[in-house]
Image: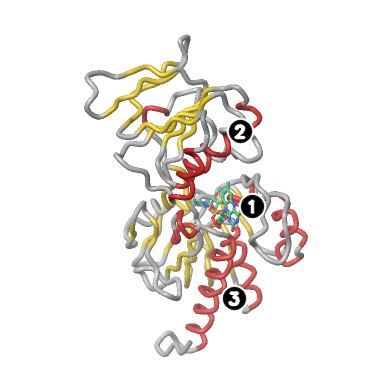
Amino acid sequence: MEKVEVLIVGAGLAGLTAAIWCKRLGLHAVVVEREREIGGQLQHIKNEIWDYPPYVYENGLALLSALKENEQVGRLDCRLGETLLSIDDNKRRIHTDKRTYEAEYVILCTGVRPNSLPALHRSNMVLAPWFSTTSQGEVLREKNVLIIGGGDRAMESGYNLAAYARHIFIAVRRNRLRARPEWVRRLSACENVTIMLNTELARTSEHEPKGVFLRTAGAPSERFLAVDWILPRIGVRGNSEAVPFLKTYGQQFVEVDSFQVTSTDWIYAVGDLTNGAAYASLALAAGQAMKAVKHISLRKKEGETNVHL
Ligand SMILES: Cc1cc2nc3c(=O)[nH]c(=O)nc-3n(C[C@H](O)[C@H](O)[C@H](O)COP(=O)(O)OP(=O)(O)OC[C@H]3O[C@@H](n4cnc5c(N)ncnc54)[C@H](O)[C@@H]3O)c2cc1C
């Protein structure tokens, strides 16, 4: 059993910022991260990042490498390859796959993961969840691509890939699009894009003829569509499975109050885990991390009962 003042789970931008703020405010923090590298989604951002002031970064790895140059980051106690499994709410014990911690406070910064479709679990036609339609579109030149989803990301992906692919098909389960009208307008100007409403993926055909079988509401049978690649854009869900006792909303995103406190008062949550897709951003993750740590620091100073902020 290891005692820590603040246990931070996840070493994406939210977790790293929380750890830096713990250093600044004199709190002893340990960060556990299930991957072998820090950075979280920064590892996967291929687009230019120009909305996290003051610099413009070529991509997520460029931002991460700048972060690693900060000598405070080098001094953080980051334990890589260690996964949070569960939390015992009554005993304040946190179980990972490596050890058990007793913590005064926990800050959950575990981010999100893309939703997946059971019909695609064994398919070789699926593009990776972090496939970048801005910087990797070239590999789909002259290919037929099926995008699944009716939100902004699906439409934006369709628009970006229309410049490369032979044809883009977009399958939308509902009878309408959730995406902003601006994306729909842009897409309707692309001649090589077909949007199919009320349409679901039934199964894939991995060998010749390669493609998918689609089920459309009201149609008597499934129909075959020849495609080379499939890009699911069906949203994300919070990585909150280790804390089933916390209140959540939407797709397992953790509910917090205005100081980032969850429904359990010694557990905080920051970053994408609590913001969901609509508000996912580096700036918000970093700001929330600061607020959570500051709140912990003030609570400790003021004896837990009389927090004035
Ligand atoms: C393609 C793409 C482009 C983007 N572009 C921009 C942009 O231009 N500007 C912008 O502001 N935002 C952008 N974003 C959003 C931004 O990257 C996220 O909002 C931000 O990185 C979220 O940080 P986070 O720390 O909350 O989560 P993450 O970065 O997801 O970090 C979560 C960490 O927790 C770890 N973890 C999860 N579960 C466990 C567990 N059980 N135990 C231990 N560790 C665990 C994960 O391995 C991960 O390292 C983009 C995102 C993507 C995917």
Residue 27, numbered circle? 3
Q: Looking at the image, tell me whether mark 3 or mark 1 is earlier in sequence order.
A: 3
- Ranked by sequence position, the earlier of labels 1 and 2 is 1
At mark 1, the secondary structure is: loop
Task: Check disc 2 and report the residue beneath it.
Answer: 163
In this rendering, the answer to whether 123 lies above or below 268 is above
| Residue annotated with mark 1 | 38
Q: Is residue 208 above or below residue 259?
A: above
C-alpha span from label 3 to label 1: 21 Å
Q: Position of residue 55 (x, y in %)?
A: 73, 62
Amino acid type at mark 1: Ile
Q: Secondary structure at mark 3?
A: loop
List x then y, in percent, for residue 287: 56, 70
Cβ at disc 1 under 8 Å from ligand 1: yes
- The residue depicted at 63 percent of the width and 58 percent of the height is 78
Q: CA distance from mark 1 to mark 2?
A: 34 Å
The image shows residue 59 at horizontal and vertical percentages of: 69, 49
Q: Is mark 2 within 8 Å of ligand 1?
A: no
Please name the amino acid that badge 2 sits on: Ala
Whole-Å distance between the Cαs marked 3 and 2?
51 Å
The mark closer to the camera, 3 or 2, is 2
The residue closer to the viewer here, 38 or 158, is 158
Between marks 1 and 2 in the image, the one whose residue lies nearer the viewer: 2
Q: Residues within 10 Å of mark 2 (few under 14, many from 20)?
A: some
Residue 297, quarter of picture: bottom right
State yes or no: discs 3 and 1 in contact (Cβ < 8 Å).
no
| Residue type indicated by callout 3 | Leu
